[in-house]
Image (cartoon, rainbow, N blue to C red):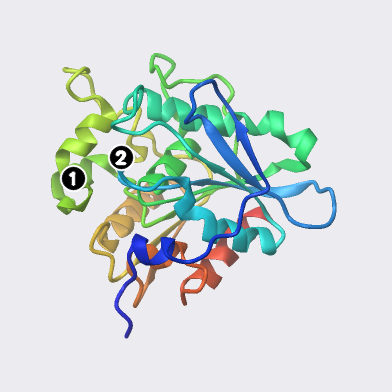
Amino acid sequence: MRAPISYLDLLARPRAPADLRLSYGEDPLQFGELWLPAGGNGPHPLVVMIHGGCWRADLPGLELMDYACADLRDQGLAVWNIEYRRIGHQGGGYPGTFLDVAQAIDHVRDLAAPHGLDIARVVFSGHSAGGHLATWALARRRLPPASPLYAADPLPARGAVPLAGIIDLAAYHAEGPDECGGPGVIDALVGADARSGVAVYGDTSPPALLPLGAPQVVISGALDHIVPSAFGAAYGAAATAAGDTVKVIDFQGAGHFELIDPTSDAWPQIRAELKALLD
């Protein structure tokens, strides 16, 4: 059995370029890259892709998802791979990280006509911290109106496919390994210091917003030491108990980064799950 790859192993490979880099806001980090299938003007089904990196500015950004994006483009799917302000960036953390993701997703409505995107066929996906944000994006319609993150008409999706997602922030804060930086990273993400006395997970952590009302495919790697698969299984059980349709997949032999590596044994099924939600 091969040892799990690292993000450095992945980034050492050549990367195909996206078709377009487009801003969704005024900050230099408020941009995304659009990957469009060759041939035909669409409308194309769309995967909104959200990179991970522990929500931290000192780790790689959207480029880590280029390999998966290129493969999905080759398979006839459009991809909107988004960047966003993270912990350590001016304006990152709470609420900026969440508002950036929301703004990038809602910007799809403006991209649809000029770029041939089918906004009736959208799925949210992301890796690690991005898996949390993808699931949170699916939950936006459940946000309380009093939350600074609330929007009246968030872009709907057919479902979410978190890949090694840190979906339950409270559970990861309490029991997660230290690879992401320990509980302090979660505290910084949810604004724990500035929101003293507030239920900080109530508008940031998907379990607090269940049921989400759309299908979810929760994918983990059995060899993942950054986000152990038990976290995905526990979230899947909670979401199912709340009434959501959830499929939990635990790939034996896969670590954390195999789930975004299109050459891995896991990737063909991951791709198939994305396509199934868009059919």
Give the residue pinned by disc 1: 181
Asked if residue 155 shows in the view, the reply is no
Who comes first in sequence, dot 2 or dot 1? 2
Numbered badge on residue 147 = none
Callout 1 amino acid: Gly
Residue sitting at 48 percent across and 50 percent down?
Answer: 63
Callout 2 crowding tier (Cα within 10 Å): few <14, some 14–19, many ≥20: many
- Direction from residue 35 to residue 256 in the image, left or right: left
- Direction from residue 213 to residue 256 in the image, left or right: left
Location of residue 161 with respect to 210 vertically, above or below: below
User: At which x and y percent is residue 20?
Assistant: 66, 42
Callout 1 crowding tier (Cα within 10 Å): few <14, some 14–19, many ≥20: few
User: At which x and y percent is residue 102?
Assistant: 50, 29
Marks 2/1 in contact by CB < 8 Å: the verdict is yes
For the residue labelled by badge 1, is the local secondary structure a helix, a strand or a loop? loop
For the residue labelled by badge 2, is the local secondary structure a helix, a strand or a loop? loop
Image quadrant containing the C terminus? bottom right
- Point out the residue furthest to the right here: 40
Give the residue pinned by disc 2: 56
Res 86 → quadrant:
top left
| Closer-to-camera residue (208/201) | 201
